Each structure stands twice: as C-alpha cells, then as structure tokens.
Amino acid sequence: MGKTIGIDLGTTNSCAAVVENGQPVIIPNEKGNRTTPSVVAFTRIGEQLTGEAALRQAAVNSDRTISSIKRHMGTNWSINIDGKKYSPQEISSIILRKLKKDAENYLGEPVTDAVITVPAYFNDIQRQATKDAGRIAGLNVKRIINEPTSAALAYGLNNGAAQKILVYDLGGGTFDVSVIEIGGDVIEVLATNGDNHLGGDDFDERIVLHLQGVLRKQNGIDLKRDVAAMQRLREAAEQCKKELSSMERARIYLPYLSMNKGEPVNFEYTLTRTEFNELTKDLVARTEGPVRNALNDAGIAASELGRVILVGGSTRIPAVQEKVRALTGKNPERSINPDECVAQGAAMQGDILTEGTLQLYNGGSGILLLDVTPLSLSIETIGGVATRLVERNSTLPVHYSQVFTTAAAFQRSVDINVLQGERPMARDNRSIGRFRLNGIKAAPAGVPQIEVTFDIDVNGILRVSAKDLDTGRAQSITIDDNERMSDAEIEQAIRDAREYAEQDGMRRQAAELNTQAGQLLNQVQSLMQEQKRSLGKEDRNFLKNDIAALQKAVSRNNPAKTTPSNVEEVQRALDNLKQSSSRILGI
C-alpha cells in the first residue's frame, strides 16, 4: 500500500508531509523549499505554472496569475483564460497536483491517497469543493480535517499529557480558533469559531492602501489601473509585513514603479512597526470575538488552558502575539512550526487511517479525533424562521432526524431550504442547498409525517435524506446548489487536467529535444569544419542531408504548438544525425 500524504492547502502557501520511520516529515518541493506558494499562472504560450515559477512572473503577467484562490472555494467565482472558464476547484487542483508530483518525486513511488486540511469554519459547500479539487488532481481524499485539529495532533505527538489547549490559527486568508482537549488516545475538539475573511492578505492590503496614499501625496499618481505596478506594490507590502515581525522598520524601494508625465517614478519609503500596528489594529481586534466565543462554547475560562498554540504565518506579527497574551494570559507555545504543523498533523492522520508506522505519544496503536461541526444547521419553516436541527460544535459524525409536516392542505410535495449559520431568521443565514420531496400522500395540513435526516460525516460534509412515514417510502433528495460542481463537471475537469498534463509533458519534451538538437548541430558543424580536408564528398553530403533534416524538423517543432508527430520527427532526425556523426566523425 502506498503512502498517504497530508496536505495543508493554504491561502498563501501550501505544504505537504508524510510519515517516515514513525515521524511526520515535510516533503520539499522541486526547488527544495518546504512550502509552495499557492499561486497558479497561465503563460501566453499555454503553459501552466505553479508555485515559485508562477509567483516570479506575477508582476508581468498579473491578469493571468491567480493567488489566494482558497478565499473563493465554495463560491461561483471563475476566471476565463484563453476561452476556458476555471472554477476555484480547478485552480486548487493545479496546486494539489503540484504537491502530489513533488511527493512522488520525494518518495519515488506513485501517490494516490491524501488527507487535506480546511479551516475549521469552512461550511459544507467549501469542504465539498476542497474534496472535489483533490479528486480532479487525481487524489483519493481519505479525510478532510480542520486545520486547528490537525495542528493539535502534531503538537500532541510530543506533548501527550492530558490538557486543554487553544489553537489560534491566523493564515493568509482565514482565521480559526479551536479549544481542544488532549487526553490519552483521544483528541476532542470542544468548540471552534472563526472568520473566513480575515488573514494575512488583509494585513498586506492595509499596507498597499497606505503606500498608494503616499504615492498620491508624493507624486500625484494613482496606481489603481496600473496592474503591473499594483502587483509589485503587493509583493513589497507582503515582504514589508514579514520584515516588521523581526525589525522595527522596513524599507521599501521600487525603482521604475510607474511613469508620471513621461518620467519614471522611483518609489522609496520606510514603514515603522508602530505605523503598521496602527494600520492593522482593527484586524487584530477582530480576532478577539472568535476567541471569546470559542472559550464560552467550550465552557471553560482562559485560565484553564494548558497551552496556546499559534498556527499560520500571520501569527508571527508581534501585535497578534500580544493580543493572544492579553486574551488568554499565556505566552504562546513556540515548540511547533506554524507553517508546517498543519501538514504534519494531516500526515499523521493519514498514517493512522492506514495503520502505518507512526510512533504515537500515547504508546497505543491509534488516536481518536473527535472534531465538531463549525456552524449550526437549520431548515426554513413557516414565517421564514430558521428551525435549528444541529447545533454548532456538535461532535462529528452527526446523525439527526426530525419529523416535519405540511403547511397547506393536500400538499403533494414540500420544498426544504437547508441553512448554515446562527441567526434566527432564514434570510440571515447561508443557504447551502434546497431540495424537494415529492409524492407525499394527499392529506389535510399537519397530517403527513415527513422525517428529514441530516448526516454529517467525519469530513464535516452534509448528506440529507427524507422519508414519508405514512407510506414508509423513502425519497431520494438531491442537493441543488449551483456553487457545487456536478459529477459530470468534475469528470470533465479531470479529463482537462490530464490533457493539460499531457500537453505540458509534450511541450517539455519538445523543448528538450530542440535543445539537444541545437547542441548536436553545433557540435557536428564545428567538427565538419575542423575535418573538412579529411572528409570525403559522400560523407560530407550524407551529414549535410541529416543536418538539413534535423534543422527542418526543429523549425516545425514549436513547443507552444507542438504535436506528437512534430516530436517524433525531431527525435527521428536527431537519432539519424547521432548515428551518422558517430560513424563519420567519431562523436
């Protein structure tokens, strides 16, 4: 059985890990780096770039470069590239496919199984979208687990003493806080809370807005419509934020940032940590509510916490750490890497599911993870009321049934609106699906007995079923939500991904063959010149014919538009010239 890898599919960076020799280890990417930028780009010649390669060219190709796609998961966002529309699932699958390939190169064997993490506050549609992205990437997603829970699992590997911990997870695009109890062979999530639209990207944007203001004041220019300049400004803002985590001031220097009245604008500015804290203080303050709510839902005081674990690169911001100390009265734990612990925990969970080699801190053969549903589940009833069926922070898996009836006489069907959220009225919550139950036995209002069952699996993904108790006939219910991909759409995306992979492979092969051909042509022509006096006319003509054939084949072999026949033609001509030059010139 192959290895199951753990993947932290992050907003800004992604990370993969695997258990080897009983310990979780980070899988380096092809550049040797331990994290990979969650960036995808499409070049003008049709190539897909992922990770560092995509990030490097973002400033000159910003309209065809996609970052922070995680913020769009579970929405109907899309981008059109060269006439093809890409969904968030498809963009995310490109990142996952890159991580899969890096893992295969590292392990030296095919990888098909994975555990993928998501923010604890992801709803059903976002979780399903993440699972679909894995499927498009060619992965069998064995489990979707919450990022704070995964971090707690990694922390517990070396800190198995019974305790309650708070995981404060501030990443590139999302914020989660979970209260988790570790004890023996059980890791139980007591409560979770968060904000899916708060993260490092927002801190970067505050710096960008500030720098735009400085530019308007100093140079009288507005960069909003200068796409390339704005991309450079965002990159500088992110680097500035990172530097201010360890220094009191950060210098920004962007030569030739833009043009003003025909003259180049060289932008230089120094931002202090005090200024940065002032620009972002409301963002830091927004983390306070979820922390208090999670503690209240867990029914414990901050003083009862054993540890506070920081997860996500944005927790390196000193003002964030100060806020955590103020809220909990504890110094945050520094024994785990905030960028890597989520992937490590996911790898551990994958190893546990396959009964691998993990050396458990409890000395046993397994760990039971008891996660929770992040938001309450309701259905819309008479008067637009959200009638709650499953409370938030219910332990997974959840199986809950409730009997409903009709509102009008002799109804033959009922429409049910499934909601996720905490508000009392349906309109104030997120509708995650609607279904219609047909074939109800005609009867006066209030007589039919319709049992609706909610099943939430260990991945936090919802399934709905219903049964007319009068007839005993079960009805199949299909969630109809246009923000989910249908099976047909997923299968098409898988085919597209395979086709792109084949095209990319052919492009690489074409480029490599052209390079080999160029090197051989130079070598042969140079030796022919050196040996022109000793070469017979017949041999010289033979070589010239093979050289011409190879040059012609290369001229037809444009990597951007290559075909299998083009590649075969170059390979054949290359082999012919190799043989003739070896026989005649002794190469």
Image (tube, helix red, strand yellow):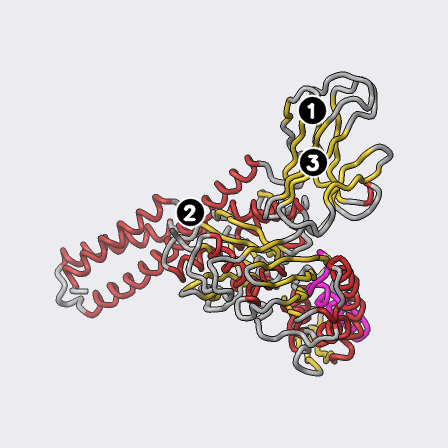
Q: Position of residue 280 (x, y in %)?
A: 77, 70
Work out whether residue 269 or residue 229 is closer to the camera in this orientation and state it.
269
Q: Secondary structure at mark 2?
A: helix
Task: Tell me whether the residue at label 2 lies in contact with that at label 3, contact meaning CB atoms closer than 8 angstroms.
Answer: no
Is residue 474 placed above or below 345 in the rendered structure?
A: above
- Judge depth for marks 2 and 3 and give the one in front: 3
Q: Residue at x 31, y 47 (%)?
A: 568
Q: CA distance from mark 2 to mark 1?
A: 50 Å
Q: Answer with mark 2 or mark 1, whichever residue precedes in sequence.
A: 1
Q: Residue at x 70, y 69 (%)?
A: 305
Q: Which residue is mark 1?
A: 468
Q: Residue at x 67, y 77 (%)?
A: 245
Could you say which quadrant of the image residue 438 lies in?
top right
Task: Tell whether position 217 is magenta.
Answer: yes
Disc number for residue 502: 2
Q: Which residues are magenta?
A: 196-218
Q: Secondary structure at mark 1?
A: strand
Q: Amino acid at mark 3?
A: Ser
Q: Where is the C terminus found, in terms of image quarters?
A: bottom left
Q: Which residue is mark 3?
A: 401
